[in-house]
Image: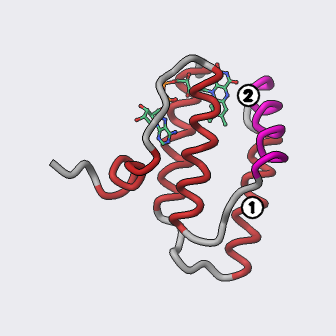
Amino acid sequence: PLDKDELGSSTWAFLHTMAAYYPSNPTNEQRKDMKTFFYLFSKFYPCNTCAEDFQGELKTSPPRTDSQEQLSQWLCEMHNIVNRKLDKPEFDCKLVNQRWRDGWLD
Ligand code: FAD
């Protein structure tokens, strides 16, 4: 079975990549569906304490699905909340598209 860290880093890769390729101008249906996706995801994520805490965060900070930029920033903030909880370094959310979509500019 996957351990919690391997599951976590694979899941973040999937979630950040999905957000990176979300439309800049989503339809109302896409906005609604992406919100629903995150609520359902939080009910079935196969790490109980992670899922419970994430459900709590969704109540305080609902998914911002109005554009790719908004969704990626929101998810970056959610990931940083988990990073803080685990004493991991915070990620600079200005760099999120470079990390997950465009590649590093060097
Ligand atoms: P990860 O945190 O997995 O990050 C992977 C990569 O993402 C990093 O290398 C970095 O390049 C990039 N990154 C880091 N921060 C950001 C950011 N803010 N925005 C964009 N990209 C970023 N583990 C627990 O022990 N307890 C929990 O309660 C818990 N809750 C979780 C909740 C969710 C929804 C998810 C998906 C995972 C959760 N995890 C939890 C797992 C945890 O977040 C890590 O995935 C795991 O500890 C492995 O960490 P890592 O150091 O490999 O990097």
Q: Against 94, is 1 above or below?
A: above
| Residue beneath the point at 68% across and 61% down | 64
| Left or right of 60, for residue 5 | left
| Residue beneath the point at 46% across and 47% down | 93
Q: Is residue 80 magenta?
A: no
Q: From the image, which quarter does the N terminus lie in?
A: top right
**Quick one: label 2, few (<14), some, or many (20+) residues within 10 Å?**
some
Q: Earlier in the sequence, mark 2 or mark 1?
A: 1
The answer to whether residue 1 is visible is no
The CA distance from mark 2 to mark 1 is 18 Å
Q: Give the x, y percent position of residue 61.
A: 75, 49
The mark found on residue 20 in the picture is none
Classify mark 1: helix, strand or loop.
Answer: helix
Q: Give the x, y percent position of residue 100.
A: 40, 50
Classify mark 2: helix, strand or loop.
Answer: helix
Q: Give the x, y percent position of residue 85.
A: 65, 22
Return the residue found at the far left.
106
| Left or right of 92, for residue 42 | right
Kindly tell me whether mark 2's CB lies below 8 Å from ligand 1. yes
Q: Which residue is mark 2?
A: 50
Q: Which residue is mark 1?
A: 35
Of residues 105 and 29, the one drawn nearer to the viewer in this rendering: 105
Q: Identify residue type, mark 1.
A: Lys
Query: Which quadrant would residue 4 be assigned to in this image?
Result: top right
**Mark 2 touches mark 1? (CB < 8 Å):** no
Residues rendered magenta in the picture: 48-61
The answer to whether residue 46 is visible is yes
| Left or right of 78, for residue 49 | right
Query: Which quadrant would residue 28 be assigned to in this image?
Result: bottom right
